[in-house]
Image (cartoon, rainbow, N blue to C red):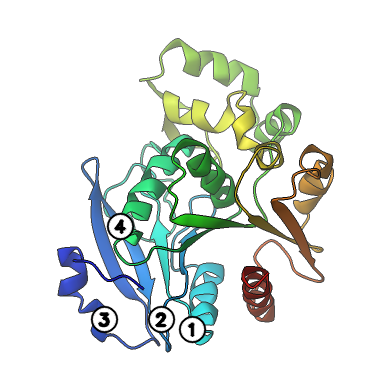
């Protein structure tokens, strides 16, 4: 594995002196925001791929599935970097709060992932990019826009699907308002702050452009459609007990002719692949890497 000069933050945290037991915080800057990640060394560092991991909707790098992936990968001799998307907040930690104006933007994740890829390239020439849930879709958005050659493979875990009818129905059920009505309000002035509710925050104030990024008619939020044209190997995991998996299963025809895409179902797993299912994810990933 190539080791170039590393950002001062890594030196401060003595990255290469840390035990594989605990992840090490890493911080970089992007467009005036401080971005955080957890770096996990392995017990057997070597010329193996580095895994760059993206969390799901408004989550963070320390949540159970992400930490479990890092621990299991380390036990198998693989290093990883689990990132926190900023969601418009500098130095964001933990889950997204509904207490302040929401300024997160779904599409902004692609550029932040690219910033982390540029950083990860100082550590390895071989990167596997992993995304859970909404993070799986954002990994695909990254791939559409940037396509660094060092990112050799993609892994999507229960990736997000989207369609207009379900989005409108879900919003109305959660917030009690017509999505079309709020969309019209947001489109009048994307820089306005509106009381609309968004994603997990049904009563929050939100920047109109942020609201539009989550709810406007944007087919790129539908991951199965993006898989149709991907040109690098992609492994998709779905759990048989995940109620959201039906949206993915119903759209397999969109990409089934693309030989770059492999789909693996894990019997008994839900959306978060807890406990032994996390190890099953990693086993599946490592077997796939050897093909």
Residue at horizontal 82%, vertical 63%?
240
**CA distance separating discs 2 and 1:** 8 Å
Badge 2 vs badge 1, beta-carbon distance below 8 Å: yes
**CA distance separating discs 2 and 3:** 13 Å
The residue under label 3 is: 16
Residue at horizontal 37%, vertical 66%?
124
Q: Which mark is residue 14?
A: none
What is the quadrant of the C terminus in the image? bottom right
**CA distance separating discs 3 and 4:** 16 Å
Horizontal and vertical percent position of residue 147: 47, 44
**SS for callout 4:** helix
User: Which residue occupies the extreme top position in the image?
Assistant: 188
Badge 3 vs badge 4, beta-carbon distance below 8 Å: no
- Earlier along the polypeptide chain: callout 2 or callout 1? 2
**SS for callout 3:** helix
The residue under label 1 is: 77
Residue 204 visible somewhere in the drawing: no
48 to 117, vertically: above or below: below
**CA distance separating discs 4 and 2:** 18 Å
Crowd tier of the residue under label 1, counting other residues whose Cα lies within 10 Å: few below 14, some 14–19, many 20 or above: some
- Earlier along the polypeptide chain: callout 4 or callout 2? 2
199 to 127, vertically: above or below: above
**CA distance separating discs 1 and 3:** 15 Å
The residue under label 4 is: 119
**SS for callout 1:** loop
- Earlier along the polypeptide chain: callout 2 or callout 3? 3
Q: Which mark is residue 46?
A: 2
Residue at horizontal 76%, vertical 57%?
263
């Amino acid at each position: 594995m190539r080791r170039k000069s590393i950002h001062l933050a890594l030196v401060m945290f003595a990255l290469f002196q840390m035990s594989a037991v605990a992840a090490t915080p890493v911080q970089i800057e992007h467009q005036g925001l401080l971005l955080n990640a957890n770096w996990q060394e392995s017990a057997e560092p070597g010329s193996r791929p580095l895994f760059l991991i993206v969390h799901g909707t408004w989550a963070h790098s320390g949540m159970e599935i992400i930490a479990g992936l890092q621990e299991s990968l380390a036990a198998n001799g693989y290093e990883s970097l689990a990132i926190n998307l900023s969601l418009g907040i500098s130095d964001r930690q933990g889950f997204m709060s509904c207490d302040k104006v929401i300024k997160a933007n779904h599409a902004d994740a692609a550029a932040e992932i690219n910033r982390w890829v540029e950083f990860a390239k100082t550590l390895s020439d071989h990167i596997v990019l992993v995304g859970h849930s909404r993070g799986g879709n954002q990994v695909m958005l990254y791939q559409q826009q940037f396509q660094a050659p060092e990112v050799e493979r993609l892994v999507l875990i229960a990736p997000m699907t989207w369609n207009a009818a379900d989005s409108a129905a879900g919003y109305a059920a959660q917030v009690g308002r017509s999505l079309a009505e709020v969309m019209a309000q947001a489109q009048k002035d994307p820089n306005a702050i509106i009381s609309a509710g968004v994603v997990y925050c049904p009563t929050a104030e939100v920047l109109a452009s942020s609201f539009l990024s989550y709810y406007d008619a944007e087919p790129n939020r539908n991951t199965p459609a993006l898989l149709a044209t991907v040109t690098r190997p992609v492994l998709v995991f779905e759990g048989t007990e995940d109620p959201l998996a039906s949206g993915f299963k119903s759209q397999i025809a969109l990409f089934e002719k693309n030989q770059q895409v492999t789909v693996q179902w894990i019997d008994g797993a839900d959306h978060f692949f807890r406990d032994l299912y996390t190890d099953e994810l990693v086993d599946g990933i490592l077997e796939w890497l050897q093909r």
